[in-house]
Image (cartoon, helix red, strand yellow):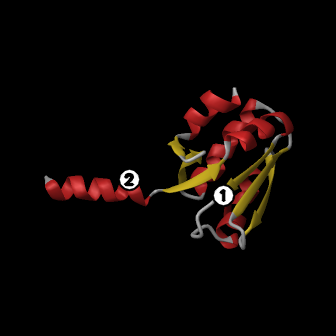
Amino acid sequence: MLFVLSLATSFAFSQNSASISEGQLKSGKSNGVYEFGVPESITSEKVDAVKGYYKDYFSVDFNESTDKLKLTLLKNEEMNIKVMNRMLVALDLRTVSVNGQEMTFQDVMDKYLK
């Protein structure tokens, strides 16, 4: 039982998180541009492998030297914002840190983007 609990705990902490400030979310809500900080484990190759699936919703710019992932919505609409979550999940980014607070993308949507 202890082994299972330990394994579950280590899995939970091994998940990657994107980061963004509350101010960036507010400006993104108005201008459709979101810039996330991502872990060093995210590479240009990983981003290039998945970004083509989302070209109908937003453009993707990734700076590997600064670990910044910039998503620019083609239309500043709720559906395009929701699809951002798919991109993050495709990169194994399961949570978003907003001003240091870990949140699910749905919580970010509910609190900042609706």
Secondary structure type for disc 1: strand
Which image quadrant for residue 9? bottom left
Label 2 environment density (alpha carbons within 10 Å; few <14, some 14–19, many ≥20): few
Q: Is residue 86 left or right of residue 69?
A: left
Give the x, y percent position of residue 42.
61, 67
In terms of depth relative to the viewer, which is nearer, 98 or 51?
98
Q: Are marks 2 and 1 in contact (CB under 8 Å)?
A: no
Indicate the amino acid at tag 1. Answer: Gly
Determine which of the numbered discs, if any, sits on residue 12 in the image: 2
**Quadrant where the image shows the C terminus:** top right
Residue 28 lies, with reference to residue 7, above or below; the image says above
Q: Could you say whether the residue bearing mark 2 is in a helix, strand or loop? A: helix
Amino acid type of the residue that numbered disc 2 sits on in the rendered structure: Ala
Please tell me whether residue 40 is drawn above or below residue 73 in the rendered image: below
Q: Residue at x 54, y 54 (%)?
A: 17
Q: Residues within 10 Å of mark 1 (few under 14, many from 20)?
A: some
Q: Is residue 12 left or right of residue 55?
A: left
Residue bearing the label numbered 1: 37
Identified at 75% across, 64% down, the residue is 62
User: Of residues 104 and 92, which is closer to you in this image?
Assistant: 104
**Mark 2 or mark 1: whose residue is earlier in sequence:** 2
Residue placed farthest to the left in the image?
1
Tell me the residue at 68%/40% (across/down).
22
